[in-house]
Amino acid sequence: MEAQQRAMPVSEGRFVEPLWMAPLDCDAALAAIPSTATISGMFIAPLVVEAKRLGVVLPSARERYLPFQFYPLVEHARVMLETCARIYPNVPIRFALRKLGRGAPKALVTSTLGKVVLASAEGVHDVVDAMAKAYPLNARPSKVTVVERAPGRVIVRLEELHYFIDSHHVGAFEGAMKYAGAEGRVLIAPRGKASADFLLEWRK
């Protein structure tokens, strides 16, 4: 861990606030998702449960999703967009996707794996490490790596994340900080359509 903390600093200038008010071409975003990409049902099921609670119909959703079964990622992304449109109709789409992302740690902890990796997590660094390990197990393909670590900050590299990387996944890491009991922000340095570096900075 000390070696990671002494890692050479990454240029701060490349990290920016996500463009929350930028338009999002939803059709293009869905079309860009590989047909072979899949995701665990544990991340789709809460959307369906919440929609039913509110009496909202999600046209693309199945009646039920099994937590440990994998489903097409494009289906998940479509259900997310329908959730945003129906539950957060007056919220800009990127903000709505961010809101959904913040629930990721809560969804993860419902699984046996999530309970194991998060139960022993203490502080943001541990929670982020747990999130990084969970990504490739639950979203395929995907790869998340902690590339720099220091007190009050961490840089995470996300690769092969083919859906809403600059909004939904920003929210996921905001949720990770909140889960760890910290307040902070997430800045982003895009590396391509499905890859980015996130800079997390926080305080207790």
Image (spheres, rainbow, N blue to C red):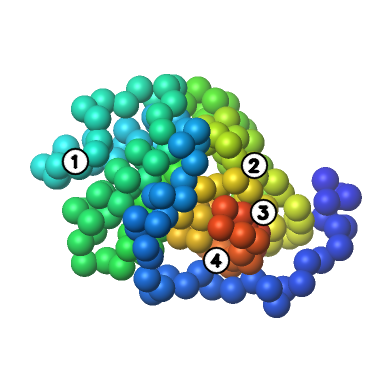
User: If the image is split into quadrants, where does the C terminus sit?
Assistant: bottom right
Asked which quadrant contains residue 116, the reply is top right
> Does residue 165 sit above or below 21 in this rendering?
above
Q: Residue at x 26, y 26 (%)?
A: 64
For marks 1 and 2 on the same chain, the one whose residue lies earlier in the sequence = 1
**Horizontal and vertical percent position of residue 45:** 32, 33
Measured Cα–Cα span from mark 4 to mark 2: 22 Å
For marks 1 and 3 on the same chain, the one whose residue lies earlier in the sequence = 1
Measured Cα–Cα span from mark 4 to mark 1: 34 Å
Q: Residue at x 58, y 67 (%)?
A: 187
Q: Residue at x 64, y 42 (%)?
A: 143
Residues under numbered marks 1 and 2 in contact, where contact means CB atoms less than 8 Å apart: no
Measured Cα–Cα span from mark 1 to mark 3: 34 Å
- Residue 185 numbered tag: 4
Asked which quadrant contains residue 96, the reply is bottom left
Left or right of residue 187: residue 54 = left
Kind of residue at disc 2: Lys
The residue singled out by tag 3 in the image is 156
Q: Residue at x 44, y 26 (%)?
A: 70
Measured Cα–Cα span from mark 3 to mark 2: 10 Å
The residue singled out by tag 1 in the image is 59
Does the rendering let one see residue 123?
A: no
- Residue 143 numbered tag: 2
Q: Secondary structure at mark 1?
A: loop
25 vs 20, nearest the viewer:
25
For marks 3 and 2 on the same chain, the one whose residue lies earlier in the sequence = 2
For marks 4 and 2 on the same chain, the one whose residue lies earlier in the sequence = 2
> Does residue 43 sit above or below 152 in this rendering?
above
Pointer 3 local density, CA inside 10 Å: few below 14, some 14–19, many at least 20: many
